[in-house]
Image (spheres, helix red, strand yellow):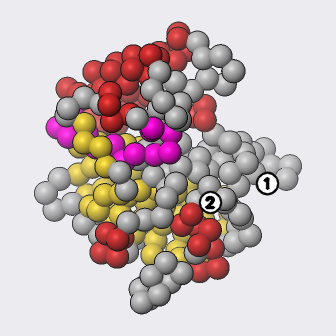
Amino acid sequence: MVSVADRSISILYDDAALIIKTERENFLCVADLHLGYSPTTSAVQLPNQRTLLLLSSKIIQISRRTHVENLVLLGDLKHNIARVTYLDRSLISQFFGELNSSFRTIRLVLGNHDGSITSILPDYVVAIRKGILLNHIYLMHGHTLPGPEVLKSNFIVMGHLHPTFYKEHSPLNGQRVWILMTLYLKSLFPKRSIPYNLIIMPSFNPETSSSSNLLYSHTFSSRTSPLLNRCQKEIVRIKTISLNGAILAEA
């Protein structure tokens, strides 16, 4: 099991979740639930509700096991991008109805799939448009460049890319993975000369993994990540780690 040197972060590898510890309280973080996603062209209500209940019950189980009562959702809570559908309204309402009694606070960092979602969020859910700083850790969805608060941090956590493993002839192909990086942000902030640690979280919804999001070497190209596009030449180290915490590739 690979551990992170920073004691403020505990990676729950097999849960596709992590915990951030601050002086006052701890936060459970998950990314990319994509409620309403269907692997077929026409969404079906029953599978969507079953997935919702599976994801919400897993979040609650992690919360009870770890005794963490603050939740941060790192974007793409819903799957439909441009608008809010009747199905979105139903699923979002039911999802937060399941979670509300288990958490003191719930924050949603908006992702690229969360268009117009603020109009249907319960009052107790705090929507965050760019990112959130918890101590020295900056959390963002990943579809935009980080906000200026990243200058107060040295650690970034993001989702968005749904990283999965692929290597020719490997039996592990298609498995969700964690990506741990060390990189500089000089392309964004020329006067910022310190290295940053970056964690790219796997999608919490196991049905939304995509082998096209290949991230296990310095040669990757990700048009959907402005941060990695701008700072690609400043990447110092990449580790690809499985959901059981084993290193699958390192560069």
Residue at (45% x, 38% y) in the render: 115
232 left or right of 9 in image? right
- Between 205 and 45, the residue placed more toward the observer is 45
Q: Position of residue 99 (x, y in %)?
A: 28, 27
Q: Position of residue 29 (x, y in %)?
A: 36, 47
Amino acid at the residue labelled 1: Lys
Residue at (13% x, 57% y) in the render: 24
Location of residue 155 with respect to 236 vertically, above or below: above
Name the disc covering residue 167, or none. Answer: 1
Q: Quadrant of the C terminus?
A: bottom right
Numbered disc 2: secondary structure: strand
Numbered disc 1: secondary structure: loop
Local packing at callout 2 (Cα closer than 10 Å; few below 14, some 14-19, many 20+) is: many
Local packing at callout 1 (Cα closer than 10 Å; few below 14, some 14-19, many 20+) is: some
Q: Are marks 2 and 1 in contact (CB under 8 Å)?
A: no
Gap in angstroms between the C-alphas marked 2 and 1? 12 Å
Membership of 112 in magenta stretch: yes
Amino acid at the residue labelled 2: Thr
Residue at (53% x, 35% y) in the render: 81
Name the disc covering residue 240, or none. Answer: 2
User: Does residue 201 appear anywhere in the picture?
Assistant: no
Location of residue 161 with respect to 44 vertically, above or below: below
Report which quarter residue 146 is drawn in: bottom left
Which residue extends farthest left? 24
Q: Position of residue 179 (x, y in %)?
A: 57, 59
Residue at (32% x, 27% y) in the render: 120
Location of residue 200 with respect to 171 vertically, above or below: below
Location of residue 107 with respect to 187 vertically, above or below: above
Residue range highlighted in magenta: 102-115
